[in-house]
Image (cartoon, grey):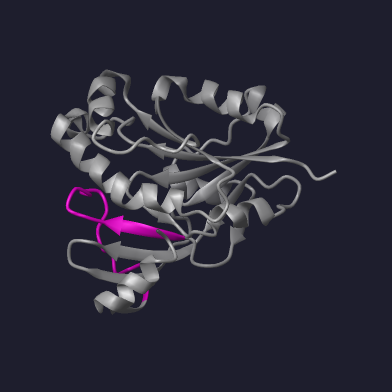
Amino acid sequence: MKEKKRIIVDILFNAWKRSSRIYDRDWIENRMKIFMNYTLKSLKGQSNQNYIALVRYDRSTEKLIRQALSKYPPLPPNIKFIDANSYNREIINSAKGYDHLYIVRLDSDDLYSKSYIQKLHDYNPKPGTQVLISRSGYIYDSVNHRIAKYFHKSPPYHALVYRVQDFINGKRHRLPKGHWSALELTHELLDGANFISHVHSQNTLFTFNKNYTVGPIITDREEIKNILKDFM
């Protein structure tokens, strides 16, 4: 009998402590617009919708989050904004009855290829593998209208792999150095261009870093549009 996987896409909206700006109405409304125009389209465009996306927000901003969401059509039932404090409970409730749990990291402004969730369902890691890492994708600058192939040894596009019962029992794969720590776990590499790192006016922590680009920078708008079609 084939073992069942529960795939959770883990998205931090403003549930981190890097800047006080992320609790402001303007920041939330602007980021919500980016999420709806890019990340949500990528999630809704997945060829396999057998996943749950949990978008985590800081509890103190719940009213602002709900107000921002009210300006858009209702989300599909498998994509939910949640109080960050309920994160573990939501995962455990969603994973009960499954054998394996994949926790897939995604920022609230980035994209996965439309075939990525299907790829995870099809992929069978070796026993003991703790994380699946995607190294290849694209970097897209939506302000200056340019895109390039992107390669990073350990970018923030990975899927942590658990047996469900182990996760329920408290097992966690720790990432003390952020996404770089994925290399210190037992890992496997996924092939293909699986992600888009999105550079935009609100993204102050990430730039169009040419140290990681591969090949030419593409500025032709039709060519950019054709690439984006595979992701949203």
Q: Look at the image and tell me whether residue 156 can be seen.
A: no
Query: Looking at this view, is 89 or 174 the one in front?
Result: 89
Query: Looking at this view, is 126 or 141 the one in front?
Result: 141
* Residue 37 spot, x, y in % from top left: 29, 51
Which of the 4 image quarters holds residue 70?
top left
* Residue 185 spot, x, y in % from top left: 60, 46
State the residue at coordinates (62%, 52%).
Answer: 120
* Residue 200 spot, x, y in % from top left: 22, 55
Is 205 part of what is drawn in magenta? yes
* In the image: residue 18, left or right of residue 189: left
State the residue at coordinates (59%, 52%).
Answer: 132
224 versus 77 height, above or below: below
94 versus 184 height, above or below: above
Q: Look at the image and tell me whether residue 222 can be seen.
A: yes
Q: Quadrant of the C terminus?
A: bottom left
> How many marks can you see?
0
State the residue at coordinates (39%, 37%).
Answer: 75
Query: Looking at this view, is 214 or 95 the one in front?
Result: 95
Q: Quadrant of the N terminus?
A: top right
Is 46 part of what is drawn in magenta? no
26 versus 187 height, above or below: above
User: What residue occupies the far front of the structure in this picture?
Assistant: 73
State the residue at coordinates (23%, 35%).
Answer: 71
* In the image: residue 54, left or right of residue 36: right
Main structural element of the magenta stretch: helix, strand or loop? Answer: loop
Which of the 4 image quarters holds residue 223?
bottom left
Which of the 4 image quarters holds residue 216?
bottom left
Please report the bounds of the magenta region as a residue range: 195-214
